[in-house]
Amino acid sequence: MRRAPAVLAALLACAGASRAAAQDSVFGIRGLGLLDRGVSGKSAALGGGYVVFDPSAAVNPASLAGWHTTAGWAVGAGSFRSFDYGTGTSSLSATRFPVVGFAGGIGEKVVVAITASDYLDRNWSVQQTDTVSPRGTPVVASDNTQSAGGVTDLRLAMAYRLPNITVGFGAHVLTGSTNTSVSRHFPDDSAFVPYTQAQTTNYAGVGFSAGALVSPLPGLVTGASVRVNGRLRATTTDTAADVPMPVEVNAGFYDQPLPGLAVAGTVGWASWSRAAGALAAAGQARSRDVWSVGLGVEVGVLRLGRRPLPLRFGYRWRQLPFPIGGDATTPGPALSEHAVTTGLGFDTAGGRATVDLGLDIGSRAAGTLSESFTTLYVGLTIRP
Amino acid sequence: MSAWRSAVFVTGLAAAAAMGCQEKVTTPSRCPALCPASKVELADTLLPLADTADTSVRGFVLIREATYLLASTLDSLQAVTLIRFSAHDTLWTVSGTKLDSLYVGTQDSLVLTLSLAQRDTTVKNLRMVIWRLPAQFDTGATYQSIQPFLADSTLIDTVAIADTAIAGSHTFNIADSLHIPPGDSGVVSLAIGIVAPSKTALTFGSGNLSTAPLLTTYVHARAPFDTATSLFSVSPSVALFVLNPAPVQPPPGILAVGGIPTARTLMRLSLPKLVVDSASVVRATLLLNTVGAVGGFAGDSFYVVAEPVVRDYGVKSVLWPDSATSGIVLVHQGQSGQIQLDMAPILRFWGTAQGDSTPRLIMLRGYPEGSILGAVNFASHTAGALGPQLEVTYVKPYSFGVP
């Protein structure tokens, strides 16, 4: 435990850097942005099927019981995307840090943890060129609108081990900000000068979560969690809005039918339609409730020296709550994404560190618009 | 410890893998689905500056401070240059002989060197007329008061200026000798005019940030050393020119810029808050209508510059020294009608914290000031529809939306 403060400091430093570096899909331009996936490298490799049982993820507080010693963890994700905008494609890339955390035990039954994870990603940048005619003279104008920032989920959670069940509770604070700017540029030889306007929006909200893990049969674990969020308050220098945030429910199983083989699956649902009224009042398209499904398989037949080298495969699908296009009365095409995943994990440093790699290859689409992506998750867990 | 070294290595590897990607985030928008809900919209408005407090004053650069000297026979402007040359030495030293110095005996010739600045090259057979003036002529002389001295009795010479002579230094042999009364203490004063088959004008350097005229006297030493020769070149102690008509302050209703002595115009603007306090102005143009044509040399051009005032002391106001916050437009001799002057840099300056406390006051002046003959008069706000107007193109307030 005496090394714990240093580990915590390093992890928090990582968390601070993530906001500036994070950038993501142009599909986050609508609604409250793109739903983040605050998952570990292991959960990413298993298609998100393991997320209810993953002590590194900020989903089920009961899963923190998976930590049997003090631990700190951080996940970095590099993403490469190709956005098809109809008349061409655009290659994009970004780096994110989906989740960092620190956990420690209190006695043998209680585990307490703090985590910081991406919740809503509002990083996007679009450029549009048009010919306008101020004063009756045509001139080419290039508009760039961009947003940087998002909402981060800070969680303080605990898990309690009972004889046949593990329960957990978490308190969440949603915080963050976005810096949105719009600029218009004219050709250098034009008599017009550039224009720029910016706005900072701050976000604040709270939520509570609870979860449980039960093992009804040998080798089989089932789990479920529910998270109830309050309103997300968005404030600028001259206005404010409250957006009801969803109730999130996740349930899943983790089974080891054979030695060296594990299967995990999770189904999730979130009532994002609660935010529809507030979004419609702001002139945006109404949000919808969304489902997500993840399924993964872990095979432990390979070894790296004397250490096991589990290989992981998975598939995931999810709906995204904010339609693309449309308005308050006419919803645009719904957005969904799916991906196939793979990865592996290994211990190092005499078992004090674990590296989990996850590769997530998929696409998201809404109507005729689509984006393919490849994301590499690199998770590092240290147990000092 | 080896385990920890491995951990550090793995940590570094993981960090490099996660953070090594370059961000590339901008993509063409796909409207309307993936465009921002709000659009950048431009709007134009024309603001009559009817309540502008404008005034013009002449005298910022005086004739004696101008970088040029003028001789002109134009109907609109006649001018004669007056120069007072200092006395040259009366002896010169000689090295390498038993003699220390030789005294000036007789003059051999006098050469006037001028640095031509501007001339109308279409006017041929231009000649320069040089008269002798009283050594201590009145520096407050006018064109009319100088006329009695422009007589045959005071004529020194009429010298031709080659048709091919262009800007640069030129020498003119104006006399073999010039008697200098003892009372003049060696001082020589000249008046320089021009004659030509048609009306024209000529400028040459005055010595103020330009090459000064030189009077060079070639001399022999006194006998018995009169075979020894030398030369003396002297610069003017006074160099100016007199004009007809004499310069006067601009009349009411006229916003004057340029000329000599140079004129400037102060305009106190009363503008809507939207125009001044917003960074959304992408173009602002001050529309000025000329009264008469732009004056100056044929084919000549100069700039009219608008600069913000930071301290209002009337005609002695302090101007903001950053040229990036000024508006500028090039005008041409003979031009008339509407002149459009870019005001966007000034409006943006007024919109900054630095410029917010400064008066909404601009100064119009010519550039280069005191170096060209160009002048332009604009109609003031009393001219009604022909008075100054401000055309503004701005971006309507953009709504980012919340959340």
Image (cartoon, grey):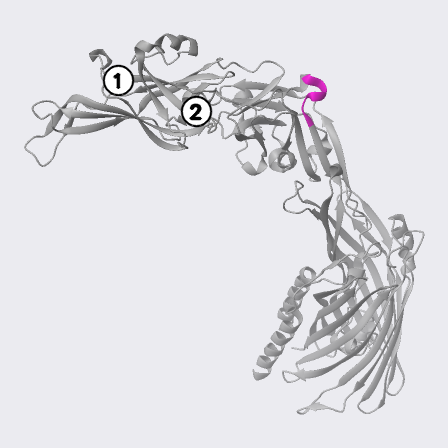
Distance from the alpha carbon under mark 2 to that under mark 1: 25 Å
Have a look at marks 2 and 1 and say if they share a chain. yes
Q: Is residue A228 left or right of residue B14?
A: right
Report helix, strand or loop for mark 2. strand
Would you say residue A185 sits in the magenta stretch? no
Q: Position of residue A51 (x, y in %)?
A: 82, 74
Q: Residue sitting at 57 percent across and 80 percent down?
A: B5
Question: Is residue B133 among the parts visible in the rendering?
Answer: no
Report helix, strand or loop for mark 1. loop
| Above or below: residue B206 compared with residue A240 | above
Q: Position of residue A118 (x, y in %)?
A: 76, 64
Instruction: Assess disc 1: are there few (<14), some (14-19) or many (≥20) residues with their C-alpha within 10 Å of its C-alpha.
Output: many
Q: Amino acid at mark 2?
A: Leu
Q: Residue sitting at 51 percent across and 16 percent down?
A: B75
Q: Quadrant of the N terminus of chain B?
A: bottom right
Picture quadrant of residue B126: top left
Q: Position of residue A226 (x, y in %)?
A: 88, 67
Q: Is residue A1 left or right of residue A164?
A: left
Sequence order check: which comes first, mark 2 or mark 1? 1
Q: What is the number of callouts on the image?
A: 2
> Chain under label 1?
B
Instruction: Assess disc 2: are there few (<14), some (14-19) or many (≥20) residues with their C-alpha within 10 Å of its C-alpha.
Output: many
Q: Amino acid at mark 1?
A: Val
Q: Position of residue B73 (x, y in %)?
A: 46, 17
Residue lying farthest left? B98
Return the residue at label 2.
B202
User: Which residues are the magenta region?
Assistant: B383-389
Question: Closer to the camera, B258 or B319?
Answer: B258
Picture quadrant of residue A105: bottom right
Return the residue at label 1.
B187
